[in-house]
Image (spheres, rainbow, N blue to C red):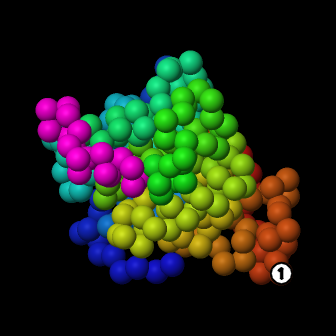
Amino acid sequence: MQRSVSQSDAVISLSAATATLGSRPVLRGVDLAVQRGEVVALLGANGSGKSTAVRSVIGQVPLTGGSVELFGTPLRRFRQWARVGYVPQRTTAAGGVPATIREVVSSGRLSRARLGLLSRADRAAVNRAIDLVGLTDRAKDSVSALSGGQHQRVLIARALACEPELLIMDEPLAGVDLASQEILAATLREQVAAGVSVLLVLHELGPLRPLIDRTVVLRDGLVVHDGPPPAGGLLPGHDAHHLTKEDCHPDAVHAAAAGVPTGLLG
Ligand SMILES: Nc1ncnc2c1ncn2[C@@H]1O[C@H](COP(=O)(O)OP(=O)(O)OP(=O)(O)O)[C@@H](O)[C@H]1O
């Protein structure tokens, strides 16, 4: 999907970013930009630094070098968090919390609410977000009673509740059943059509492939590929263990034969 973007329109700009976790250098000079209206997939093997890169973009991991800008503003001065929706890598952290779907999604609206109180318009936005992910019938249910895929839909609705201009999602399809994957793809399609910019960490493009403008592949904390997603279906670094039927398209096989490097993806 091609949309016109200009260099000055970066919503995320990570430049020469380095970060260390424990004593381990996890980002070793990462350049990553997302232009307004663009959908960028960040790929790479387990441990290559994908989550650390997106967490550094939102300030959860401090950089030891380089810089981050959001909407053209250096991160340390950036305050407009209602413009950003973040979906963390799914954990079981919400397990046991006696909160309903509506309560969790409402918490995503607080950055836009005045004095922490939700107005009628805020509540309507929360309901819209719940509806977008197909959970209206379950809004009063406890999140602890949900499947993995449903839980992921709640996290995405929470990010959408503030009507963000930029969505950052860390492995939104991980552990998500096919039905939920399709709902998530449709939700994302709507957001992208409305002009939302997206950075998402993925293991494979799957049903999101048609939405992706550009793929960036990390290996050992370095960018080893930055370009359009391959037409033939084979991701840079995709090895034989990960081939799907779709990847066996003749173009993809040709790309593999042409020596596309292997072993970058988990
Ligand atoms: N808090 C931490 N302390 C020390 N090392 C960490 C910490 N968090 C992550 N790491 C290490 O940093 C490296 C990069 O982790 P990161 O989560 O960014 O990778 P990833 O590409 O997102 O991997 P995955 O696909 O498994 O989620 C890994 O080797 C990981 O073990």
Q: Can residue 48 be seen here? A: no
Task: State left or right for residue 249 relative to residue 131.
Answer: right
Task: State left or right for residue 61 relative to residue 145.
Answer: left
Q: Percent x, y for residue 37?
A: 36, 69
Q: Residue at x 65, y 55 (%)?
A: 181
Q: Nearer the viewer, residue 167 or 220?
A: 167
SS at mark 1 in the image: helix
* Residue 232 position (above or below residue 29): below
* Residue 76 position (above or below residue 219): above
Q: Percent x, y for residue 201?
A: 54, 50
Q: Amino acid at mark 1?
A: Pro
Q: Is residue 167 magenta?
A: no
Q: Is residue 117 magenta?
A: yes
Disc 1 target residue: 250
The total number of labels drawn is 1
Q: Can residue 211 be seen here? A: yes
Q: Residue at x 54, y 33 (%)?
A: 141
Q: Nearer the viewer, residue 192 or 21?
A: 192
Q: Residue at x 43, y 59 (%)?
A: 198
> Which image quadrant is residue 258 in?
bottom right
Task: State left or right for residue 114 relative to residue 183.
Answer: left
* Extent of the magenta region: 112-129
Q: Residue at x 69, y 56 (%)?
A: 179
Is ligand 1 closer than 8 angstroms to the Cβ of mark 1?
no
* Mark 1 neighbour density, 10 Å: few (under 14) some (14–19) many (20 or more): few
Q: Percent x, y for residue 167?
A: 40, 53
Q: Percent x, y for residue 57?
A: 36, 43
